[in-house]
Amino acid sequence: MENQVGFAQEPGLSLQDSHGKEFGPKKKLPLQDDNSKGLCPKKKLTPEQVKQALVEEAGRLGIDKIGFATADPFTELKERLVRHRENGFESGFEEQDLDKRTDPRLSLPEARTIIAIALAYPTRMENPPANRPGEYRGLFCRASWGQDYHRVLRRKLEGLERRLQELVPDVTTEIMVDTGALSDRAVAERAGIGFIGKNTSLITPEFGSWVFLGEMLVDIALPPDQPVTAGCGDCTACIDACPTGALVAPGQLNSQACLAYQTQTKGFLAEEYRDLLGGYLYGFETCQAVCPFNRKKNFTHQEDFRPDPEQVKPLLKPLLSISNREFRERFGSMAGSWRGKKPIQRNAIIALARFRDRTAVPDLIRLLQEDPRPVIRGTAAWALGRIGGTEAEEALCDAERNEKDPDVWREVEKALKNRSTLDTEERRDREAQG
Ligand code: B12
Ligand code: SF4
């Protein structure tokens, strides 16, 4: 005998929107066991119930916040993004198609709802290894601690997707975490996850801005949440603290001047930024660290984001000679490795210069003489100029004679000029000490 047909999400259930109109699967699927279930009275599953089931599932999956928003176009954001581009404030990491960035239906044509999630990440390390002379360390920003958040949030969203498919079998979905077309912050704001701070971050009342964001577009209408009403008030701590003035106006960032962006570029780091990195190898977070909403916030319950101190605060010198394979093995699982090892090594050289680590001079000389990458040779030259000393000076003079790359040569020249300043200061100090 042929099976009776019915809704497969839960035999005997059908979906209704708030007006009582059915919005469930248009396609009817065969029931597995029509004898028992087909005879049961149909239970109505309203959009509110679907939403509630997803909220409960989010709790089981360990999602810290979930919110629901309409999939209407982000019209105001589009105007903002156009001005952002005209001002040259983009980083280049954003989706380039502004229509796609602001119209969810260009990613999922039937999109009705966006389900936004947030996961909190920790801000303090237990037993962080100390900096010691000759054993200095660099730092990955907190957003790079533990497992790469792209994978973690995607896994959580896939868990939600599975539950939704049980409830609404032919639902269509599209998951996005960071690399999707939409602005994760704008989505999260609309879904009531938090508000946009003057530092441009999405700030939640519970976890501050120490949260990652992701979303799932779905082609069914679920009741939206209300945006959070809190805000920054008169506070301007992040704008005042940003060392490059990258926060050009409340909620407006010139990404090109943002040190988080600058740590991720692959070319030479502009000289004006080198003294400002403060030992960061990847990312930057002053505008979050000073925010009162982040004060004393340290949520360590997400196992996936627990930092391995040797990974997130690594010794600098070994980074200079790390092989591609070793780099992948040690750092490949972190978000901060996505640009490869070159920017990390460049930043490690800059950090060694900051510490004026004389024990790094032989390694830096080797880089200056042998590394095939001009950015690494040139940055090593600059660092040698900063650290100074006879050995460094001789290596720089050799490079002045032999270096063929014009950019590296310019760095060598600058380093020699800086070195003479340092030496003059050293000489003056020694004379003063008698
Ligand atoms: C490109 C990018 C960057 C660039 C540019 C950042 C920027 N602020 O534009 C760089 C490399 C600098 C960067 C740095 C960081 N990033 Co980033 N980045 C992105 C990415 C891929 C796109 C962001 C984008 O489109 N920016 C352009 C601006 C104009 O749009 P927007 O920031 O998305 O949204 C703005 C508008 O909606 C506007 N807006 C809307 N309405 C209104 C109304 C008013 C009145 C105002 C004033 C503004 C406003 O304000 C929003 C906030 O900036 C997103 C992922 C994604 N797909 O969204 C992650 C993302 C924004 N980054 C993230 C993180 C964690 C970081 C860092 C903290 C990492 C670090 N420690 O180094 C820093 C923070 C620096 C900072 N202050 O933004 C998280 C942010 C989480 C959060 N809680 O906000 C995201 C969402 C990734 C994720 N999925 O979790 N990032
Ligand atoms: S530091 Fe102050 S102004 Fe900046 S985001 Fe936090 S509350 Fe807003």
Image (cartoon, rainbow, N blue to C red):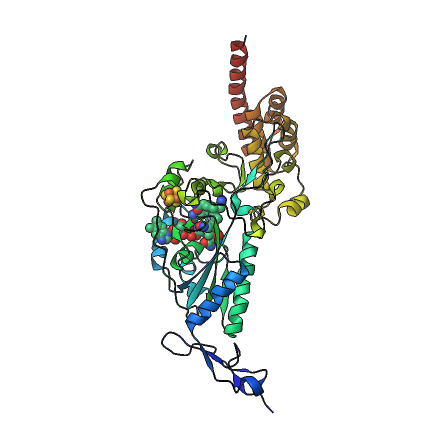
Q: Residue furthest bottom?
A: 1
User: Toward the viewer: 128 or 271?
Assistant: 128
Residue at point 42% right, 54% down?
A: 185
222 versus 381 height, above or below? below
User: Toward the viewer: 336 or 127?
Assistant: 127
Compared across the picture, whether 158 is left or right of 88 comes to: right
User: Residue 358 at x, y = what percent?
Assistant: 61, 25
Compared across the picture, whether 376 is left or right of 248 comes to: right
User: Residue 349 at x, y = what percent?
Assistant: 58, 33
Quarter of the image with the C terminus is top right
152 versus 397 height, above or below? below
View quadrant of ligand 2:
top left
Quarter of the image with the N terminus is bottom right
Compared across the picture, whether 143 is left or right of 365 comes to: left
User: Residue 313 at x, y = what percent?
Assistant: 59, 39
Residue at point 53% right, 80% down?
A: 11
**Res. 220 in view:** no
User: Residue 109 at x, y = what percent?
Assistant: 44, 69
Residue at point 52% right, 87% down?
A: 39
416 versus 122 height, above or below? above
